[in-house]
Image: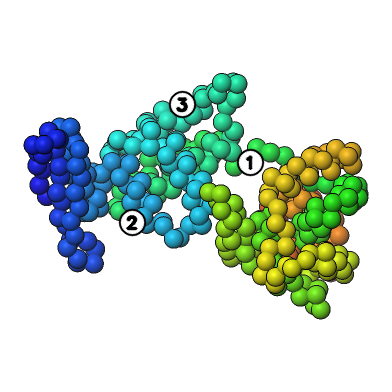
Amino acid sequence: MSVYKEEKTGTWRVLYRYTDWTGEKKQTQKRGFKTKREAQAWEREQMNLVSSSLDMTFQSFAERYREDKAGRIKENTWEMKNQIIETKLLPYFGKLKISSITPQQIISWQNELLNYKDDKGKAYSPVYLKTVHNQLSAIFNHAVRYYNLRENPCTKAGSMGKKKNREMLFWTKTEYLKFADVMMDKPLSFYAFEMLYWCGIREGELLALPPADFDFEKGTVTINKSYQRLKGQDVITTPKTEKSNRTITMPQFLTDEIQDYLKMQYDIGEDDRMFTITKSYLHREMDRGSKEAGVKRIRIHDLRHSAISLLIDMGFSATAIADRVGHESIDITYNYAHLFPSKQKEMAEKLNMERND
C-alpha cells in the first residue's frame, strides 16, 4: 500500500494492493484526502479489514457485518436493520475501535436513547428500544462468534426496553361479524378481511396470494410467499419463517366466497395477485369499518390474534392451531396461555384417583 500526494489537486491518494480470501490479487484506491494523516488512517483501516483485525472501527466492522449477512436476511428485514445501524449505532460508536468499546459506553448510549424526547415530547417506545439494543448486540455477537472478539460488552451492560408493550387486542366472533357486515359494500375489502380472519394469515401472505394457490376441489389455500412494498416496488418474498409455509383447509363458506370473488375479477391470470391493494388501504378500511360497526379499533395483525383466540375457544390444541397459522406451538402456548382453559382442577382430581387406586 502506498500514500501519494497529487500535485494538481494538493490532496492525498492511497493505492492499496492485497490478496483476497480466494488468493486473487486485487487493487483498490481512494483519492481526495486533505492530509497525509487522513490518508494513512484510511490505509490502516483497509489493512484491518483485509486481515479481519479487531483494531478496525465499529463502522468498518458494521460494513463487514453487512457483507457477511448479505443474502441471508430478507430485504425488508435488512432495511429495518440498516436504518437502525445508520441512525442509532454509527453516530455513537462509528469511530471507536470495536475491540475497545466498553460496557460503560454501552450504558451511556442507552441512557441517551432512554432520555430522548422528540419535538412533541414523545419518547422511543420500549419495544423500539429493545429492537435497537438487540441490533447492537447482534453485531457484537457476530464479532465474538466469527472474529474472535473476547466478549460482547452488551451482555455486561444489560438490555433496555422490553419485548412487548402493547396489550394483545382481539375481536370476539360477534365483533368480527359486525365489522364484516359493514365491509360488504366493498367486495374487495370484505373478501380480504374474510381471508385474514377465518384463515388467520398475515397481511403480507394475503397480499401475495394468486388464484394458483387455491385448490377449490380440496378447499385449501397454500401459503408459500409474502408481499412487501420496498423502495416503491412490489416485492414477493418467501414467508416470514420456515414454519409459515403451510396449506390451510378453508371452511366451505369461505371456499365459496373466494370463488365468487374470482368470478368478479376479469382477465386475472393464475399467477397474478388477487388483492392488488396496500397495507395502508387495509388500515384505512379497518378505521372505517370499526367506526361504522361500533366495535373497538384493533390492528390488522390483531385479526390474527382474533382467529387464534376463536380456535382456542373452540377447543383446539396449541399444536393444531400452530400448524394452521404458521407458528411454533410453544409460541401459541406462551403468548395465549391465559386463553386456554385451566386444567388444574382436572389434574388434581386425576391425581387423587391415582393415589387411591
Q: Horizontal and vertical percent for residue 76?
A: 53, 52
How is the structure coloured here?
A: rainbow
Q: Amino acid at mark 3?
A: Glu
What residue do we see at 82% from left, 40% from top?
288
- Please tell me whether mark 1 sits on a helix, a strand or a loop: loop
Q: Horizontal and vertical percent for residue 58?
A: 32, 41
Quarter holding the C terminus is bottom right
Q: Is residue 128 visible?
A: yes
Q: Nearer the viewer, residue 25 or 267?
A: 267
Mark 3 vs 2, N-terminal side: 3
Is 263 placed above or below 151 here? below
Q: Horizontal and vertical percent for residue 292?
A: 88, 39
**Image disc number at residue 146:** 2
Q: Is residue 159 left or right of residue 331?
A: left
- Please tell me whether mark 3 sits on a helix, a strand or a loop: helix
What residue do we see at 51% from left, 57% from top?
74
- Residue bearing mark 3: 112
What residue do we see at 29% from left, 52% from top?
148
Is 155 placed above or below 332 here? above
Q: Amino acid at mark 2?
A: Tyr
- Residue bearing mark 1: 164
- Please tell me whether mark 2 sits on a helix, a strand or a loop: helix
Mark 1 vs 3, N-terminal side: 3
Q: Is residue 143 left or right of residue 5?
A: right
What residue do we see at 48% from left, 51% from top?
78
Q: Horizontal and vertical percent for residue 175?
A: 88, 46
Q: Is residue 323 visible?
A: no
